[in-house]
Image (tube, grey):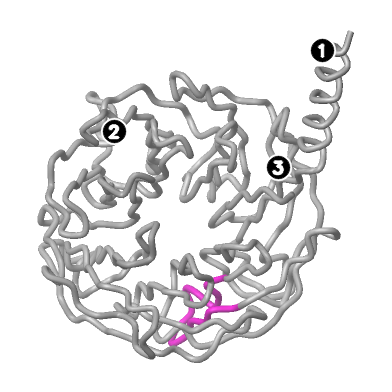
Amino acid sequence: MLKKIISLLVILVSGTVVFAQQCYVFVGSYNTDKTKNGIYVFSMNTNTGELTPVSSVKNVMNPSFISLSPNGKYLYACTDTRMANAGNIASYGFNQKEGTLSFINSQSSGGDNPVYVSPHPSGKWLIAANYYGGSAAVFPVDENGVVAPAAQVIAYKDSSINKERQERSHIHSANFSPDGRYAYFPDLGADKIRIYRFMAGNKTPLHTATPAYIKTIPGSGPRHFAVHPNQKYAYCITELNGAIEVYRNLPNLQLIQNLFTHPANSTETFGSADIHISPDGRFLYASNRGTENNIAIYSIQKNGTLQLAGYEPSGGEHPRNFGLSPDGKFLLAANMNSGDIVVFKRNAQTGLLQKTGFQVKVFNPSVVVARMYP
């Protein structure tokens, strides 16, 4: 009898914990007009994947990328993108109880068309990538989420073999290692992944590593980057030739595998976009735009290399970005051209995806991020 009572109490306590957790989904939009919604907040049912609108933000132009502070209290957005001689990093406070965002402040991104912003694990710094400006930037952040003017802006003037897309440097993402000791900046225009030691105690924390960069395959166009949770391997998706490059020996990045993200019979030669690793570190996902509009699924082997597990149509057109729920149960695809966020159930054993039947309409979604709150 006592065992039954204890079991019941465990179930009740477990149920309370699960019930108390709230998953929010944040979506950015190339809204093209400040009078239109630019950032959306949805509540996600962690059992079914259903998304329910909660709030939205106007008076912001073209938030191309968003990220959340380590404590989840603040949202940072690349804004004023795709506009001549413009680019900012904006900060918003997030009210977990109400599910609303409130503007805090904004700073110049240090270059045109910012497309990526990442917080340091300490929450005290941001790094950003300016695509048209061809520069990397670093910003101090105070305990109230206020972003200070850039402490460093490093511009590059390299180029590569694709004369239309690689006429000069185009930094496409800014990524911290999980321990915050290094920062990586894929340069689509120069076919380089730039590497820095991050000295968090310094006023100018970016210090060139040795080597300062590694070269990718000429004409590949490195775009987004993901470090495995074990910090032994890293993966870079290359937009222009549609491939994934696998590296070991971090932070020096020794190439051990290069494989195309497209099916063997594909005629698509470009358009690969986003890349993420499942929370358990067992699977990697990559999105393909163009005519395929799919999510490529790979199992991660013990040596860090990838093995194809399958493909899943993204459920729309032009999956520029996608995200995984923190518990790894769902994948959310942001299909920019068809204007929708499509929710997939993820099989934790096979990595394969299955449509849940849930999706929401969002004008030109640029990025989607999910976060669990207690």
Where 77 falls versus 215 (above or below)?
below
Q: Is residue 358 above or below residue 231?
A: above
Q: Which residue is the site of mark 1?
A: 3
Determine the secondary structure under disc 1: helix
Mark 2 = which residue? Answer: 262
Q: Give the range drawn in magenta.
A: 77-90
| Residue 164 x %, y % | 21, 65
The numbered mark, 3 or 1, whose residue comes first in the sequence reads: 1
Residue nearer the viewer, 313 or 76: 76
Q: In this view, does 65 lie above or below 349?
A: below
Distance from Cα at disc 3 to Cα at disc 2: 27 Å
- Category of crowding for the residue at label 1, using alpha-carbon neighbours closer than 10 angstroms: few (below 14), some (14–19), many (at least 20): few
Q: Which residue is drawn at 63% across and 65% down?
A: 31
Label 2: which secondary element? loop
Of the 4 image quadrants, the one containing the N terminus is: top right
Q: Which mark is residue 318?
A: none
Gap between marks 1 and 2, in whole Å? 54 Å
| Nearer-N-terminus badge (1/2) | 1
Q: Quadrant of residue 266?
A: top left
Question: Mark 3 to mark 1: distance in Å?
Answer: 45 Å
**Residue type for callout 2:** His
Residue plotted at (55% across, 63% down): 67
Name the residue furthest front. 2
Q: Position of residue 221 (x, y in %)?
A: 23, 57
Q: Residue 196: within the magenta?
A: no
Counting from the top left corner in percent of width and height, residue 331 is at: 55, 36
Front-lying residue, 289 or 164: 289
Q: Which of these two is toward me, 98 or 243?
A: 98
